[in-house]
Structures are given as C-alpha cells and as structure tokens.
Image (cartoon, rainbow, N blue to C red):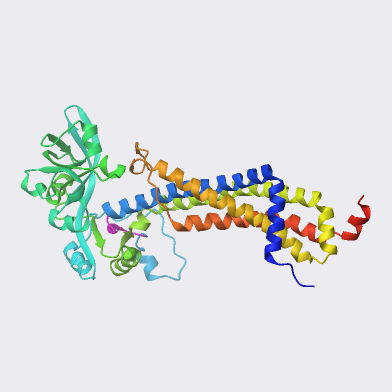
Amino acid sequence: MTPAGAGLLLGIGLSHLGRRRRQTAVSIAGIMMGVAAYLVISSMMLGFQNDFIRRIIDVSPHVTMLDEYRSPPLQPAVRTFPEAAVEIIGLRPKQELRGLRNPGKLLAEIQAIPGVQAAPALRGQAILRFGSTDVSATIIGVEPELEARVSNIERDLTAGSLAALKTTANGVILGVGLARKLGIAMHDTVNVVSPTGVVLRMKVAGLLRTGITNIDSFQAYILLKKVQVLLGRANVVNRINLRLADVTRAREVAARLESLNAYRTESWEEANEEVLGLFIVQRAIMFSVISAILIVAGFGIFNIISTVIHEKARDIAILKSVGFLERDLRRIFLIEGVIVGAAGALLGWALGYAIISALAQVRFSMDLIATIEGFVLERWWGHYAISGVMAVGVASIAAWLPARHAADLDPVEILRGGP
C-alpha cells in the first residue's frame, strides 16, 4: 500500500478541528498567550540587560588595575620549602603603604598595547559637608586630559566641564544624586573632609549624570594632586583605568597585565559578575514560566485530539479498512497539532508585537541599578523563532501521544462492536 497524499490528510485534519471550533479556539488562545508573554517578557529583559551593559561599558573602565593582589604573597618559609609541611601561626601582615608602584612605568607598558588607553586614579572615602548636611562619598582623583581618553565623563556632564578641574581653584565634579543629597548647585562651595582630618573648601565645577545610581549618587571627581593631599598619599595612585578599542578583549588584556605585574586586574565582566549572573537566573526563570504556560496549552491540544479520536473511532476503523496506513493516521493527528501550534504562534507573534509597541510609548522614571525612563525594550528575531519552535514543538508532542493510540486501534474490533 502507498501512503495517502498530504492534501487528503490535511483536509481530514482541518475537518476534525472545524467540528470542535470552541475547543480549537481555546487551545489556539492558550498557545497565543504563551508566545505573546514570551515575546514581551524577553523583549523587556533583553532591553534592560543590554541597556545596563551598554551603560557599564560606556561609563566604567573596560579594565581596572588595582593596588592589591588576587591572593596574598607567600611567606618566605613557604617559598623556601614549598614541599614541606610548614605552619605559620600568629603572623601579622607586613605594614606597607598601599598603592601601585612605579605608576609611570605601568602606564607606559599599558599604553604600548595596541588599542588601549590608560589613566591613573586615586580613589578613597571622604565626607562632603554643605551647611549642616554631611554626606559620605567616594572621591576620585583624576588627570583631566588622560581621564577624557578612558571615560565619557565630559559627555555625561549636565553642567561644567572636565577641564574645569584644572582651571577652577579646588574644583570638584559631583554626581547629580550626590549634589541633590547635599542641596548644592553649580559654583557653590562644599567642604571635603578626609579620614586623615584634612579639610579642603572646594567649588562645584561640574555636575555629572550617567544614569548609573552608584556613580551619580556616591561619587565626586577631583584633581589627582588634590586627592593625594586629602588622603595624605603624595605621588600615589591606587588604580589605573583602561579603555579598549575592542571591548571584547577586556578579559584577555586583564589576564595579560595581571600575569606581567601581579596586581589584581579586573575586566568589566569580572567587576560586574554578580549582576551578569543575575541576568542568567532571570532568563532561566522566564523560560520556566513560559514553558509552564505552553505545557498547559498543550494539555488543551491533547484533550481535543483525544476527544476526536474517541468520537471518530469508527471513522478511523473505516479509514484503516480502506487502505490507510498507521503512519497516515498518525500524520493526520500530528497535522492537527501542528496547525493549532502554528496558528497560536502566528497570533502570538502579532499580539506580542502589538503589546511591545504599546509598552514602548509608556514613560516613567525609576532608579534601580540604573536610572530607567520608560520600558527599555529590544526586539530580536531569535525570540520569534524560539517561541515559534516552542509552540509547534509543544503542540506536536501533545498531538503525538493520542495519535499513536489512534494508529493502534483495531478496525475489526471497532466495526464488530459498532451498531
């Protein structure tokens, strides 16, 4: 016997679905809602994640060399007898001045790497005092000319300029959130009190808005020499910030520099590892929720086809008796499942696209890890492909189980027991 034609099988499948329109519509709606939910949630998540990564890459160094070591240096006894059973008890770390040694030499080595710009910085804590308001902040000492090569501070300034740190006596650039806490504005004078007790009266020479809450609300930029005075660390820097022409080389460059100089050197991925790890968890949760929705919709398809098989058992027996093969019958019911899944996917694509377009018009302001103004949405063709494959796959699996039962029916037993 030869297999039945695809057109005939498609016609039979459509006839079955058409006779149970309400159940078919409910199953298609279930698939549609699952696909639309996947598209909307994935668009929001991808948009937020990519926006956050773009901001991090934009406002933070791609690579940072710190004045610390990834693991403490070995004690002389351990270095001398590496294979011996050595135990050192009650040994205090050696007191030494923190800071990068020979920063000029390190800068020259780094800038010799193609596609890399570098700038020194000294970072520490201080109290900013304006009137009766005291706010703890991170002060960062920079060289304006070099800092302009490794960051976009100049672009993110809402007032003032980076060069004003040199042209203004004791100038300081504040994040807009920090300025708001202090109740301070451009050209006001603020007292900066360091942990060593040094106090400098500084004039606001610029206001910075990056959209990253940790920067805008807690950081202040001051000329490097002034921070060295405040912290009592003359001619010392405790980090070198790098910016790369190719940001994907960050891990490679960080590993290379750390192997050469031993100082802990972090790429932007390592520095934000915890947040990037949360993004993976978010994706896993999203796939779990959407899979659950589609599986529930799959039960609806299973119910439809099982009911059709029960009601059409005599028709199935007749089809087998006139020459339809078992695989033909399986294909009929698989076709029904695929039709429902494909129809649900197409309608879900349209609904998801419409919802995403509507959400893109909504505007609001929220401070989380970064300042968000409205939904950050990003469409990607892969989401449509993934949701379509998931919808048709779930529908096919839901149809396959009853389809096997239909193909195994014995026509003789069915017709013998019929009226």
Magenta region's main secondary structure? strand
Q: Which sits in the foreground, 277 or 82?
A: 277
Residue shown at the point (23%, 59%) measured from the top left: 100
**Percent x, y for residue 414?**
89, 55
Q: Is residue 178 above or below residue 120?
A: above
**Percent x, y for residue 298?**
66, 50
Residue shown at the point (46%, 48%) measured from the top left: 353
Q: Which sits in the foreground, 234 or 110?
A: 110
Q: Which residues are magenta?
A: 61-70
Residue shown at the point (49%, 48%) measured from the top left: 350
Q: Which sits in the foreground, 109 or 46?
A: 46
**Percent x, y for residue 122?**
20, 52
Residue 166 placement, left or right of 114: left
Q: Quadrant of the N terminus?
A: bottom right
Residue shown at the point (71%, 61%) measured from the top left: 9
Residue 265 magenta-highlighted: no
Residue reaching furthest top?
A: 132
**Does any portion of residue 25 appear in the rendered image?**
yes
**Does any portion of residue 41 appear in the rendered image?**
no
The quarter of the picture where residue 260 lies is bottom left
Q: Is residue 365 above or below residue 312?
A: above
**Percent x, y for residue 355?**
45, 43
The quarter of the picture where residue 149 lies is bottom left
Residue 68 magenta-highlighted: yes
